[in-house]
Image (spheres, helix red, strand yellow):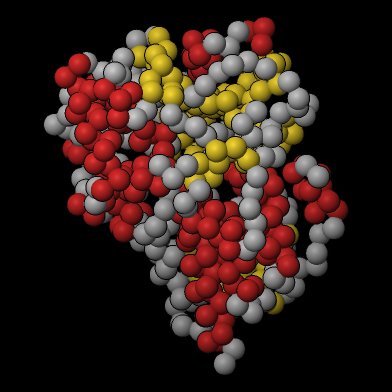
């Protein structure tokens, strides 16, 4: 069953929303579903409500037999989300990305680079004197202590390196973190993610919508009620510990012992609750990207990373089952600086198509395209000045005794989907405990 069919089936069988429950989770993305699972497995009665359908930015759609994620998505095999799925006996099928040989785009040309000690010493995009420095830096990376880099920006960490070495490393940091902000992004967080990426990433068969469906099934099997197309207008509670929380859902009210807000960024949490998010200044502006999906006839194309411009190309199919037989699905991305406007859609589209052509894709290969002109990748990355991952807002950042937050910008662990799953699980556990204390 496709993700679209799954969503249609859920919409046709919407459950009855109770007027009172233990935990309400606002938002049914990765964070919200992980919060619901954690709370429900600890005995709490849980209602999850989403203004749209479950999945959020982890949703996927189907078109002409192609499965399209919202931009390039990869599951980090050593990350929290992969571990949570494995713990619940869910082992997603897919293809593991082979990064032994990559294409590096520099000066308008794609160069073949073999990763590894010998390949780096012959690296065609580095000057002769830079190759040994680059090889030494990669050799040190597994042993680097991220704590020693926390509070330093990526630019500061790499500031003593030659320009070509710095650009080469920043290229991989963008790939692992989706963040193009070397002047403010925390180097400790970058190294943690780089080291995790060395454990491999998985392109998921069927798209991330199937992961969402699996998480939703875990939540409902544990007893949670998941409701689509139910928009929360406000979350209200007073500062008295143990007070019940009111959730305004259209023209109805749900009374809960605890609420987990897992929809959107800090602005959404503040708008719904009227409370300020503590430490939100430790985050960058939302991380955004321009994305282009190319559904193509079978063509031999490998991973291409931009060294002197922030672009990415990867053939997600046939490595993963995302395309019909004889076809491939290629994902391209331009990483935007936090706060940067994407620019004219036509110009963005033309620039990404140029990258595809340089990689070996002809216009005749393309069956159809989909441009996501500017999409949010994550609602904020950890800054060096904010203390890195440890400085991000916590699940208690709203300062309201019965309201917690969970999202990709919350908590001291992980980036991207792993931050969502980690903070979701932690918030779900905390919410269940709050309800247990209230019900005593």
Residue 31, by quadrant, is bottom right
Left or right: 35, with 60 as reference point: left
Left or right: 194, with 130 as reference point: right
Q: Quadrant of the C terminus?
A: bottom right
Quick check: 44 above or below 131?
below
Quick check: 31 above or below 245?
above
Q: How many numbered circles does the render carry? A: 0
Percent of width and height locating residue 133: 19, 28
Residue placed furthest toward the right: 12
Residue placed furthest toward the bottom: 440
> Nearest the camera: 288 or 328?
328
Residue at left offset 69%, top offset 34%: 321
Quick check: 243 above or below 48?
below
Question: Is residue 407 shown to the viewer in this render?
Answer: no
Percent of width and height locating residue 77: 50, 48
Percent of width and height locating residue 251: 72, 63
Question: Is residue 433 shown to the viewer in this render?
Answer: yes
> Nearest the camera: 143 or 54?
143
Percent of width and height locating residue 311: 43, 23
Residue placed furthest toward the left: 160
Residue placed furthest toward the front: 118
Residue at left offset 80%, top offset 67%: 16
Left or right: 286, with 127 as reference point: right
Residue 231, by quadrant, is bottom right
């Amino acid at each position: 069953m496709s993700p679209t069919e799954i969503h249609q089936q859920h919409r046709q069988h919407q459950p009855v929303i109770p007027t009172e429950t233990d935990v309400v989770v606002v938002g049914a993305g990765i964070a919200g579903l992980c919060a619901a699972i954690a709370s429900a497995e600890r005995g709490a009665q849980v209602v999850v409500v989403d203004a749209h359908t479950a999945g959020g930015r982890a949703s996927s759609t189907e078109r002409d037999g192609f499965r399209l994620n919202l931009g390039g998505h990869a599951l980090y095999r050593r990350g929290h989300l992969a571990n949570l799925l494995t713990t619940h006996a869910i082992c997603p099928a897919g293809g593991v990305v082979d990064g032994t040989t990559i294409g590096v785009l520099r000066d308008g040309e794609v160069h073949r680079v073999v990763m590894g000690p010998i390949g780096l010493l012959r690296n065609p995009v580095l000057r002769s004197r830079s190759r040994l420095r680059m090889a030494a830096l990669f050799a040190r990376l597994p042993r680097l202590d991220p704590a020693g880099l926390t509070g330093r920006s990526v630019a500061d960490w790499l500031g003593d390196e030659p320009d070509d070495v710095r650009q080469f490393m920043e290229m991989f940091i963008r790939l692992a973190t989706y963040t193009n902000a070397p002047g403010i992004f925390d180097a400790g967080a970058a190294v943690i993610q780089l080291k995790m990426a060395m454990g491999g990433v998985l392109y998921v068969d069927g798209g991330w919508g199937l992961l969402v469906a699996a998480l939703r099934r875990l939540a409902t099997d544990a007893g949670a009620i998941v409701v689509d197309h139910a928009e929360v207008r406000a979350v209200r509670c007073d500062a008295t510990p143990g007070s019940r929380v009111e959730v305004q859902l259209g023209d109805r009210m749900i009374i809960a012992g605890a609420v987990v807000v897992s929809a959107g960024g800090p602005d959404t949490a503040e708008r719904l609750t009227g409370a300020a998010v503590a430490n939100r200044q430790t985050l960058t502006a939302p991380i955004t990207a321009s994305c282009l999906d190319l559904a193509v006839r079978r063509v031999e194309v490998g991973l291409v990373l931009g060294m002197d411009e922030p672009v990415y190309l990867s053939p997600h199919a046939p490595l993963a089952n995302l395309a019909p037989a004889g076809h491939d699905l290629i994902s391209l991305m331009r990483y935007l600086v936090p706060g940067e406007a994407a620019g004219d859609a036509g110009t963005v589209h033309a620039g990404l198509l140029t990258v595809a052509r340089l990689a070996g894709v002809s216009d005749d290969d393309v069956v159809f395209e989909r441009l996501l002109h500017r999409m949010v990748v994550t609602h904020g990355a950890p800054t060096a000045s904010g203390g890195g991952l440890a400085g991000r807002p916590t699940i208690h950042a709203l300062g309201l005794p019965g309201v917690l937050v969970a999202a990709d910008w919350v908590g001291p662990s992980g980036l991207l989907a792993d931050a969502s799953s980690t903070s979701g699980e932690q918030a779900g556990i905390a919410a269940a405990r709050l309800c247990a204390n209230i019900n005593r």
